[in-house]
Amino acid sequence: MEERLQKIMANAGVASRRKCEQYILEGKVQVNGETVETLGIKANPRKDIITVNGRPINKLAQADKIVVALHKPKGVITSMSDPEGRKTVKDFIKGIKTRVYPIGRLDYDTEGLLLFTNDGELANRLTHPRHHVGKIYWATVKGVPHGDALEKLKHGIMLEDGMTQPAEVEYHDVDLEKNEATISIIIYEGRNRQVRRMFEAIGHKVIRLRRIQFGNITLHGLARGKHRLLTKSEINELKQSIKTISGDK
């Protein structure tokens, strides 16, 4: 059965579907020895020989799909390599022999739950905002935001790259002596530094940011810098958190 090339690659664990599309456009993908440079091409993963930079992916498609949870420390970049020699998230999952990729990102100064997988299709569904998979953060901000300010975040707020989707926001803790507040915020998108920019837009700089939950997966029991494999039951629950969209396959 033929499928779109980028979907086959994502299912094989090459990368997210979007990244696979980039590989195709860059001329890094071959089907039966012929380089493909346009999107929309279909192939049969059981019959066709598909390679990325000369490496066959067909065997990868048969590998067990896994999901890894990492408690990412602050001061670590969400990348599997860094030309500048900075510490990366790969340094904290060295015991994982299967090649995995981060599902979304956490910026350098943000700590908390980061998921990895070799299932590109799952990664694509978990990160696409239309599937409405929630990510919960605790954001400690300078000052105590007024309720009206938080209402703006709840209804969506205009950033330089457009209006955000509505968020779920509530006070988690308030420290009047330090003039700080920790706000619990649930978002369903994954824009660059989104939570920080949302609070800056209402006049409150984020001092500390921690992601505590992604879908049904939490940080509970996972020490900073440590990782663990999700159970099959947890993975199934994670998949169930993806809302079915009419017409989506």
Image (spheres, rainbow, N blue to C red):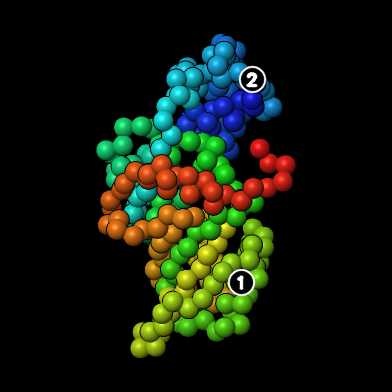
Specify which label sits upstream in the sequence, 2 or 1. 2
Disc 1 residue crowd, few under 14, some 14–19, many 20+, Cα 10 Å: some
Q: Is residue 206 visible?
A: no
Residue 39 in sight in this render:
yes
Q: Residue at x 41, y 61 (%)?
A: 212
Q: Is label 2 or label 1 in front?
A: 2
Above or below, comparing residue 209 to residue 131 in the picture: below
Which residue in the protein does label 1 denote? 154
Relative height, residue 148 to residue 246 (above, below)? below
Location of mark 2 (residue): 1
Depth check: 86 or 41 in front?
Answer: 41
Where in the figure is residue 85, as x and y percent of width and height? 31, 43
Q: Position of residue 114 (x, y in %)?
A: 41, 51
Quarter of the figure with residue 49 = top right
Residue 79 on image: x %, y %: 40, 43
**The N terminus sits in image quarter:** top right
Split into 4 quadrants, where in the image is the C terminus?
A: top right
- Kindly report the distance in space between the C-alpha atoms of the residues bearing marks 2 and 1: 44 Å
Along the line of sight, which residue is nearer the eye, 72 or 188?
Answer: 188
Disc 2 marks a residue whose amino acid type is Met
What residue type is disc 1 on?
Answer: Lys
Report the front residue among 191 and 100: 100
Rendered residue at 37%/45% (across/down): 230
Is residue 148 placed above or below 215 in the rendered structure? Answer: below
* Mark drawn on residue 215: none
Query: Going by the picture, which residue comes out furthest to the front?
Result: 233
Which residue is painted at 46% across and 55% down in the image?
A: 216
